[in-house]
Image (cartoon, rainbow, N blue to C red):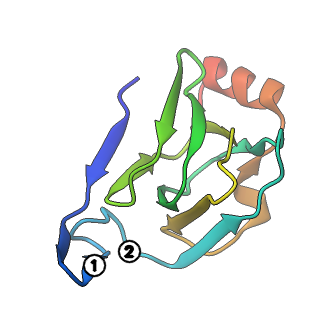
Amino acid sequence: MQIKLIQLQKHGDERGSLVALEEEKNIPFPIKRVYYLFKTQDGVRRGLHAHKKLKQVAIAVRGSCRFLLDDGDEKIDLLLDNPAQGLLIESFMWREMYDFSDDCVLMVLADDYYDEGDYIRSYEEFHALAHGGK
């Protein structure tokens, strides 16, 4: 499994830093939805699903959290802790977010609007689909 971390261009000087997010430039898809997670309680795991079609980029704009990504054959665990770096999450990828720092703000950009029908919420179903054809 290949994981893509997108290096986002950071601009700044003594006044601070700025990162611009632009669809089809540093975000490789049209942005239709933006949401963010914050004040996640200790020990809580978020995500616990895959998407049939949706693509996303996750950015820890503050603090850090860990991601477990699973394509049905391989699992990768990584730390997201750089506000100038985005994690591209392709479709049909199981994801779990955990070990959130107290100050974590995790922003997610998505290529489509919320659609409950696009979710695979059962790991067993995801795993069976991954090995039986998508």
Residue wearing tag 1: 16
Q: Which residue is drawn at 24% across and 65% down?
A: 26
Quarter occupied by the C terminus = top right
x and y percentages locating residue 44 in the rendered image: 83, 43
Compared across the picture, whether 104 is left or right of 62 comes to: right
> The disc labelled 1 sits on which kind of residue?
Gly
x and y percentages locating residue 125 in the rendered image: 80, 29
Mark closer to the observer (2, 1): 1
x and y percentages locating residue 35 in the rendered image: 62, 73
Quadrant location of residue 85?
bottom left
| 108 vs 110, nearest the viewer | 108
Q: Residues within 10 Å of mark 1 (few under 14, many from 20)?
A: few
Residue 19 visible? The answer is: no
From what the image shows, is residue 35 above or below residue 133? below
User: Which SS class for mark 2?
Assistant: loop
Mark 2 → mark 1, Cα distance in angstroms: 28 Å
Q: Which residue is drawn at 17% across and 74% down?
A: 11
| 47 vs 8, nearest the viewer | 8
> The disc labelled 2 sits on which kind of residue?
Pro
Give the total number of marks visible in the rendering. Answer: 2
From what the image shows, is residue 10 above or below residue 55? below
x and y percentages locating residue 73 in the rendered image: 55, 15
Residue 30: mark in rendering: 2
From what the image shows, is residue 56 above or below residue 30? above
